[in-house]
């Protein structure tokens, strides 16, 4: 059975009876929970070895799964046994928890450079797998009162259809979703699916998205403030359900055609992500032939978000390629398994709209 260890200060603590690692495209900080119960006679309890705030790594047969810090440690004992529970998050936890600080505004800088400025005080680097020439430049960007470092970075990149995600080593990556495809990885009913299916919801989906912003005065707007708007429809919603979103254009790239294009991208992004999240696939999977390796996706290592894989499920009329948005890796007395959440690859992209609902097929885009 592959060994799962908690590594700290060069020391590997093993023997965990319950392990869960959670990674998601929608949460920057990955999380982990580990627990063990040991007879007092078997070995000395690790009291004092594991402390809150410690830097740790979660490793699966020496493959790095997560690098971060311990949030909480819980110890208890009886006359015959000792219990230890440890929980924590990846290095990005400080970006999520802490306020962003910066004097003044960033002007005429690429968004990856601004994100790096926000992350560096927390000891984190921001890299990108995109061509630098494709990264937008912010005319002006400034922090909002009380927002966290992650909220600032997310606000900076989201309107361009980009995301910041955590690497297993804790560093940050500015990327687009779905750049990595594994055609040989397939989630298939009767092969590796324990259970799962489809969830459909219209609660957060609207028939029309109307984005509005006020342009700051400049030569192009003839010295006067100008209101701009852009509307985009979701043909998958048949009833009248409009949503108006106001954006503060004066704090961003707020002049001319560039501002209008950014408003269009933001509106399309909002429509596509809401449409995508209204259709979710959820599966518990195992590794065929060796259930102890169910954290693995074939030859590509441990399951990870932001990859596109195949799904074949004739119980729910699903047959196509889908984006893994969330991964929960679990081991307990009940066994080893991976819980996966998936959606349309296009759901996180601003360029491609969803089509009308198909009567014959469960999913269309």
Image (spheres, rainbow, N blue to C red):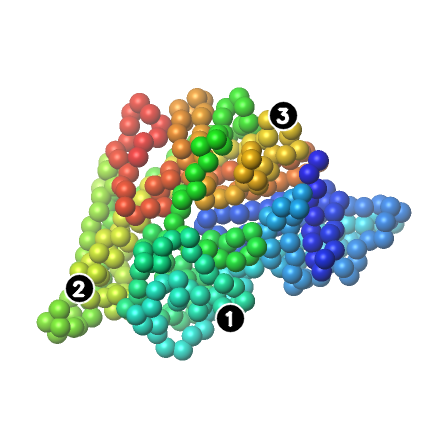
Residue 180: horizontal and vertical position, in percent? 43, 42
The residue that disc 2 covers is: 256
The residue that disc 3 covers is: 289
Along the line of sight, which residue is nearer the eye, 127 or 357?
127
Residue at coordinates 36% horizontally, 55% vertically from top-left? 131
CA gap between label 1 and label 2 equals 34 Å
Residue 259: horizontal and vertical position, in percent? 22, 61
User: Given this view, does label 3 or label 2 mark the residue nearer the observer?
Assistant: 3
CA gap between label 3 and label 1 equals 47 Å
Residue 8 visible at all: yes
Q: Quadrant of the N terminus?
A: top right
Label 1: few (<14), some (14–19) or many (≥20) C-alpha neighbours in 10 Å: few
3 or 2: tag closer to the N-terminus: 2
As helix, strand or loop, the secondary structure at mark 2 comes to helix
As helix, strand or loop, the secondary structure at mark 3 comes to loop
The label shown at residue 20 is: none
Q: Residue furthest right?
A: 41
Residue at coordinates 77% horizontally, 61% vertically from top-left? 48
As helix, strand or loop, the secondary structure at mark 1 comes to helix
**Left of 63 or right of it: where is 98?**
left
Residue at coordinates 81% horizontally, 50% vertically from top-left? 82
Q: Decide: marks 3, 2 in contact (CB < 8 A)?
A: no
The residue that disc 1 covers is: 121
Q: Is residue 99 above or below residue 81?
A: below
1 or 2: tag closer to the N-terminus: 1
- Quadrant of the rendered structure where residue 355 is? top left
3 or 1: tag closer to the N-terminus: 1
**Left of 267 or right of it: where is 66?**
right
Residue 169: horizontal and vertical position, in percent? 57, 55
Q: Is residue 14 above or below residue 8?
A: above
- Quadrant of the rendered structure where residue 117 is? bottom left
Residue at coordinates 40% horizontally, 44% vertically from top-left? 179
């Amino acid at each position: 059975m592959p060994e799962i260890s908690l590594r700290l200060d060069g020391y590997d603590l093993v023997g965990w009876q319950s392990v869960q690692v959670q990674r998601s495209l929608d949460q920057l900080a990955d999380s982990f929970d580990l627990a063990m119960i040991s007879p007092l006679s078997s070995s000395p309890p690790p009291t004092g070895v594991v402390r809150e705030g410690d830097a740790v790594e979660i490793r699966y047969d020496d493959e790095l799964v997560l690098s971060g810090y311990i949030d909480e440690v819980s110890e208890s004992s009886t006359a015959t046994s000792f219990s230890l529970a440890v929980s924590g998050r990846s290095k990005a936890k400080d970006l999520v928890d802490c306020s962003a600080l910066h004097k003044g505004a960033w002007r005429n800088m690429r968004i990856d450079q601004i994100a790096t400025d926000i992350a560096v005080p927390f000891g984190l680097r921001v890299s990108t797998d995109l061509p630098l020439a494709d990264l937008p430049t912010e005319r002006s960007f400034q922090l909002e009162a009380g927002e966290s470092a992650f909220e600032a970075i997310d606000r900076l990149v989201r309107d361009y259809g980009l995301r910041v995600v955590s690497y297993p080593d804790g560093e940050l990556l500015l990327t687009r979703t779905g750049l990595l495809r594994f055609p040989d990885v397939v989630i298939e009913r009767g092969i590796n699916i324990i259970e799962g299916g489809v969830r459909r919801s219209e609660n957060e989906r609207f028939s029309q998205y109307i984005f509005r912003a006020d342009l700051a005065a400049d030569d192009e707007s003839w010295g006067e403030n100008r209101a701009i708007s852009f509307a985009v429809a979701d043909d998958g919603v048949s009833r009248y359900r409009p949503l108006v979103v106001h954006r503060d254009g004066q704090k961003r790239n707020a002049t001319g055609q560039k501002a209008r294009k950014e408003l269009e991208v933001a509106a399309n992004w909002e429509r596509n992500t809401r449409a995508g999240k209204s259709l979710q696939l959820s599966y518990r999977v195992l590794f065929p032939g060796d259930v102890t390796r169910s954290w693995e996706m074939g030859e590509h290592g441990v399951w990870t978000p932001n990859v596109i894989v195949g799904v074949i499920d004739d119980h729910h009329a699903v047959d196509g390629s889908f984006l893994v948005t969330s991964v929960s890796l679990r081991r307990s007395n009940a066994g080893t398994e991976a819980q996966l959440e998936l959606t349309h690859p296009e759901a996180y992209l601003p360029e491609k709209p969803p089509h009308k609902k198909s009567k014959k097929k469960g999913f269309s885009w």
